[in-house]
Image: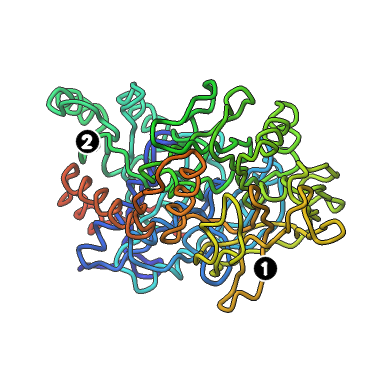
Amino acid sequence: MSGEKARHGGARAIMVQGTMSNVGKSLIAAGLCRALARRGLSVAPFKSQNMALNSGVTRDGREMGRAQVIQAHAAGVEPDVRMNPILLKPTSDTGSQVVVLGEPLATMGARRYAAFRRDLREVVASAYRELAQGRDVMVIEGAGSPAEINLNADDIVNMGMARMAHAPVILVADIDPGGVFAQVVGTLELLAPADRALVRGVVINKFRGDPEILAPGLGQLEELTGVPVLGVVPYRRFDLGDEDSLSARLDAGARGSGEPALPGCVDVAVVRLPHLSNFTDFDQLDRHPRARVRYVDRAEALGRPDLVVLPGTKATLDDLRWMRERGLDRCVRSLAGQSTPVIGICGGYQMLGRELVDDLGSDGGGREEGLGLLPVVTEFSADKRMAQVTGRFDGGLAGAFSRLSGLPIEGYEVHMGRTWPQPPAGGRGGSGEHVRPAVLLGAGGGRPDGAALPTVMGTYVHGLFDASGVSSALVDALLERRGLAPDAPEAPDARAFEDRQLDLLADTLERSLDMDALMGIIERGVDDEARGETG
């Protein structure tokens, strides 16, 4: 790209902001990363502050938002915590664990963090400068809405970030729930004049229908605001790992009654915990043509599935208490007693044990009796383990998990606390069966993780089902248990599937947006009058 480059590291920038949460900012940003990278540009994503419970772990063992991991893949670069220097992981309605440059800093209430946020400005600016060095374009994502006027002071994620990066802004609005014109006009009207001057285009997202019917309204919108509409993006379902609790897939089966499995398919019930995290763990199972994954939050909705999964959670003790209040703990134990397979991942693994001890207050404090389905005890600590891992399932798995024996896995760990085996005399579980590790990690399989009985398994490894062959082996085993032919086709490779989805997303944006106008916005950047502060 020709012309004078922005001061922060040399790269030009484009920022994607939204009229509200869940308008599709993350996907639009990912699609732009892929579209620009396909044009031969060096691109990197950036989101200064992300609030989400779906996270990923980088190669050097640090934590960042899942959305920026996918955007990095879209840009064809290695995920780097500088792409998401601040990650907020909610632990309650008013507090979050604050992760800075991939490392947990503290758990803070909203007021304390609001006061602390101004101290993070230089962290954000430095991370951005370093990433931008040598890049052609930075694709920046905002959070929520820039019109949250109560949060504008010391803003570092929306217009404050745009000013810091000298970035022109495109404003994304979601037409699907209605009121799209009011969304755009209202947002722009609430912006300060200098911030409004940074908005160089509007994108209407998630449109169903004939765009020609929308055209007169778009013309009026441009007349009212003076901001051009860059395009209308049709409603499409891109399977790219939803970021947080606004995901529509979490509503699948959450509030209905227990339903039988579809003919010829296995029924996987994931308990929808209040602080459910990393639910992308189950995307690969959900993509399997003979598996149906649903999320349940009531005992009566659980029914009689072929597999019960207790997922990860950011508040294990609180969510365990929540399960007891709803009777879900009794239902899971009852199903396990009738030989229904149960898998727990991370916090779900901890819940499956006999006792959870948090004397240090790392998980809210206290002690709780677990479900007692695995002979293990968890002790929470102040340290957080974050690492990418490879390995294989234990070679001696039996029962419902026998088809998994020895299969390779790859994933990541992100958890606080350690879980210790406590088998009774003879090294057997409560059912009299031998307890085995669930997986063996490391190149030589030297580090056992988790615990497994014939119908109950727990592990700390996220991404357990992503490696080639794992989801199909599990579905085959579940089909066999129902007396169905174990001829399940192989689920698509997770990374190849993600790449295809990213290409489809970029193709959709290329067809829907005025890309020449967008490239012009990137090339021109913002003039000195619109830049405001220099960071």
Task: Please provide percent x and percent y for residue 267.
Answer: 48, 36
Q: Give the alpha-carbon distance from disc 2 to disc 1, as whole Å.
A: 51 Å
Task: Please provide percent x and percent y for residue 239.
Answer: 36, 45
Q: Name the residue that disc number 2 marks.
A: 232
Q: Name the residue that disc number 1 marks.
A: 448
> Residue 208 lies in what quarter of the image?
top left
| Left or right position of 316 against 35 | right
Q: Earlier in the sequence, mark 2 or mark 1?
A: 2
Point 18% across, 50% down: residue: 515
> Residue 384 lies in what quarter of the image?
bottom right
Amino acid on which disc 2 is placed: Val
362 and 424: which is toward the camera:
424
Point 35% across, 70% down: residue: 10
| Left or right position of 39 against 156 | left
Amino acid on which disc 1 is placed: Pro
Q: Which mark is residue 49?
A: none
Callout 1 secondary element: strand
Point 72% across, 34% down: residue: 329
Residue 138 is at least partly visible in this image: yes
Task: Please provide percent x and percent y for residue 419.
Answer: 76, 58
Look at discs 2 and 1 and give the one toward the viewer.
1
Task: Please provide percent x and percent y for residue 53.
Answer: 57, 46
Callout 2 secondary element: strand
* Callout 2 touching callout 1 (CB < 8 Å): no
Q: Quadrant of the N terminus?
A: bottom left
